[in-house]
Image (cartoon, rainbow, N blue to C red):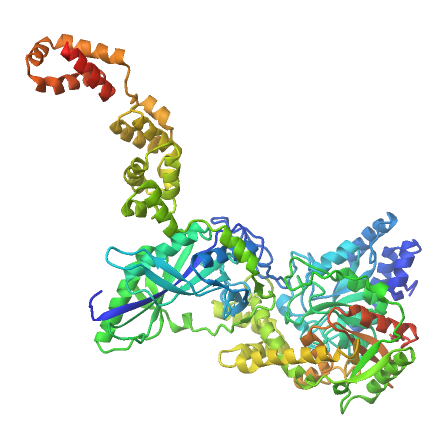
Amino acid sequence: MKTDAYEAVIGLEVHAHMLTRSKLFCGCATEFGAPPNHNVCPVCMAMPGVLPVLNRHVVELAIRTGLAAHSEIAPHSVFARKSYFYPDLPKGYQISQYDEPLCRGGYIELAARQDGEPRRIRLVRIHLEEDAGKNIHAESASLVDFNRSGVPLMEIVSEPDLRSPEEAVAYLRELRGILVAVGASDGKMEEGSLRCDVNVSVRPRDATELGARTEIKNLNSFRFVEKAIVYEVNRQIEEIAAGRRIAQETHLWDPEREVTRPMRSKEFANDYRYFPEPDLPPLIVPPDLVEKIKAEMPDLPAQQREKYARDFGLTTYEVSVLLGRNDLGDYFVNVLAQGINAKTAANWIMTEVLRAVNESAQPLEKAAPQPQETGALLRMVEDSRISLNAAKSAFAAMCRSGKGAQATVAELGLAQVSDEAAIAEACDRVLAAEGAKLAEYRAGREKLYGFFVGAVMKAMGGKGNPKVVNEVLRRKLAG
Amino acid sequence: MGSELNRLTISEARERLRRREITSRELTRDCLERIAALEPRLNAFITVCETEAMAQAAEADRRLAQSDAPSLCGIPLGIKDIYCTRGVRTTCASKILGNFTPPFDATVIEKLRAEGAVFVGKANMDEFAMGSSTENSAFGPTRNPHDLERVAGGSSGGSAAAVAADECLASLGTDTGGSIRLPASFCGVVGIKPTYSRVSRYGVVAYASSLDQVGPLARTVRDAAAVLRAVAGADPRDSTCSARPVPDYERALSGEVRGMRIGVPREYFVEGMDGAVEGAVRGALKRLESMGARTVEISLPHTDYAVAAYYLIATAEASANLARYDGVRYGLRAGADNNIELYNRTRAQGFGAEVKRRIMLGTFALSAGYYDAYYLKAQKVRTLIRRDFERAFESCDLVAAPVAPTTAFRLGEKTGDPLKMYLSDIFTISVNLAGLPAMSVPCGADEGALPIGLQLIGPPFGEEAILRAGDAWERAGGFARRAPQL
């Protein structure tokens, strides 16, 4: 930010696609990537006379999320119709929750940074709603794909408690971690599973009143969220410094030019004419359902972080890397299952595995071997059957070929030779060939020891187990 | 006209079908012949399903031959064109759905198919069930079989006229503010609007979701009871549908009304009411008293606000329900260069005047700044009207009233004055707002031989009580139905 005289005030509205097999109000599949208009039925195409039936699993996932965020789970909540015309909205209204949402209040705690206290970001609400279809503009016509029509969304609205772009991203990461942990979302922002609208205003640092805010839409990556907020905060400060007023308006993030631009008023000036959805009775959540879900709550990110640090003796940094992606934590646990030391496993994942992922630009499951195979490879290192360097070569080969640890080590001939007889034989050959040096050594030139080790290893093609080589060689040298 | 099996009641027809004295094909053919003869004058049907009906009748005859026959097996019915019927055009009497053929059946249609019923055609109606005379149909008005210059009532006018004119044995209508009871009264047939939630609304084109209810029209109370039983009951596809078990309504028809307390609301006998209507209703009540029922005067003090509340709630819901007719996925699509033009032209060309009027009314009622004063206030009135009835049912078992202040009016008489038309429903609308069951049963005729209906209103899920009273009145000679002279 350009000046310290101002403070940013930021609130986030996050839309999360929910991890369910079927849609919010009908039985159609929610799978991603089906041919256009494949996962549709009379209900999600809004044929005349059809009626919505609420997906029970969606409600349970939302309650889990609400509990994770310390929200109050409303025993009585109401669906409403939000009316507007758009070709991808088949009913001409979206079924959403309006003045009586399922989860009310709550907060998300951000891990303490080095200097400060943990921060609590309060939530306004979490509610359920259905997604719209997708307009596709072809050259001579506009087409609509209704596969996404009726897919369940959860909208998580924060209070304007965030004070910097970094904090907004930290909040978003923590929220994503919670959504993934409770199984409500896959958290894949780049695939559109999470979409974020940001409300931004600025005010003089000593002010208590809020400034006029703009809403930035169309943010689908952490990077864009951060960049858009930085841009917008600076823009607002410049406007105010120039004596202009901030208009309360909606902006769109332009990822090409990395600027926000106001939407034409026509694009959002809607009177949504909300009223209670008469086709759905109020949603009644009995207390015993909440209790049942509470009893089955999985570990949340904060608890997981604590557990990793405590159980595996990892540093805060190591934990943050391993739990910073949805998939690394599971990978780590599966490597450990092969009896690998936690530090060894963590180091290996943070270097070798992440390198493979970054270099291939593929998802983890494609970029790296199965965690069982990585574990088997590290097991060989711990058992001194291969060297650490050999393991690195083998791992790189495994990433390319997809073959197992055993097969790769065998194929590349990386297995260490620990057999004393074989090593003794190699030592004898070296000593026989190097009679002069041997005499010098025995005469007291002990620094020749390294030369003999090197020679033996060379004679064994680098595969001699260094420990055994040392033992045998010292014995032979001693005569 | 040959055998005239089309004049049978369901009770008579199913006995004769079961005894193999007649076949469903003969019965259906007689109905189709009657339809062919009358339709040019009556216009009770938008679509006649001759081929499908004969195929259904043949299938019903097979089931009857195997003694695998549910109660409506082989019975020819008329279906209001508001029910989605797989493979058969469903227009809702609107140009906007003029070419729409649903790929699915409404739940009640599915149930009737399972029963082996035969569908002779899709009955005419007011466009999207908005109207009281069936004059708001894109396919021309239905005429009253008792006087072709008069309306059949609405919005289920085709369903009522077809039954009255013996084009089918019974029919399905829908009732949002009186749309079954009013045409039943005008055409001299029995019509039931069940408790809200008693029958599934899935696949019934929505007008006002919190008020719409499915119901039968028939020539006798017993016939109506048989059809109601077949269509009522829980539906996993309708979240507002009750899981309460469905009683065998015909069993409730004991003919006994002794000790029954019938409430007579003072607010339903008003100044300016047709003398013949009041006379017929009061006469019927006297008769029921002579059979052992007791009448008590009751008050429904918020009656005056019902029409206003109804036209806010129903139009608000309709404004959203009808938003889906946008020219994008099915139905009429007007040529256009962009979205806004597509909506404007499709809806301008596709909807009739009354539908447009109600969409505008409802859009206005829900608009920012007006919601509290209109929609919310109307919902409060709705609660008061419901409480009026709750209080009334503390002192009576059912309520009796006229269905409408007049008998069938002339075609065109009220089309120029929407408010006058809206007041046709003054006695029926409260029942929808309160979600109660009610029935129109013929109780007399005016000097022009136009039928008059008696309205019997029950407490929630009190269908059996009103059916018992209506049936008892019928058995006691009630009003001898006179077949219209056509």
Residue drawn at x 30%, y 60% is A167
In this rendering, does residue B132 appear at all? Answer: no
Q: Is residue A286 above or below residue A448?
A: below
Q: Position of residue A43 (x, y in %)?
A: 59, 59
The N terminus of chain A appears in which quarter of the rendering?
A: bottom left
Q: Is residue A77 left or right of residue A124?
A: right
Answer with the quarter of the image where residue A48 lies: bottom right
Q: Position of residue A117 (x, y in %)?
A: 28, 60
Q: In this view, does B355 lie above or below B168?
A: below
Q: Which residue lies furthest to the front in this view?
A: A310
Between B81 and A386, the one nearer to me in the picture = A386
Q: Is residue B478 left or right of residue B400?
A: right
Q: In this view, does A257 lie to the left or right of A36?
A: left
Q: Position of residue B463 (x, y in %)?
A: 78, 69
Q: How many marks?
A: 0
Q: Residue furthest bottom?
A: B271
Between B406 and B389, the one nearer to me in the picture = B389
Q: Is residue A470 above or below residue B39?
A: above
Q: Is residue B14 left or right of residue A86?
A: right
The C terminus of chain A appears in which quarter of the rendering?
A: top left
Answer with the quarter of the image where residue B111 lies: bottom right
Answer with the quarter of the image where residue B242 lies: bottom right
Residue drawn at x 51%, y 54% is A293
In this rendering, does residue A114 appear at all? Answer: yes
Q: Where is residue A400 in the image (x, y as percent from the top left)?
A: 33, 32
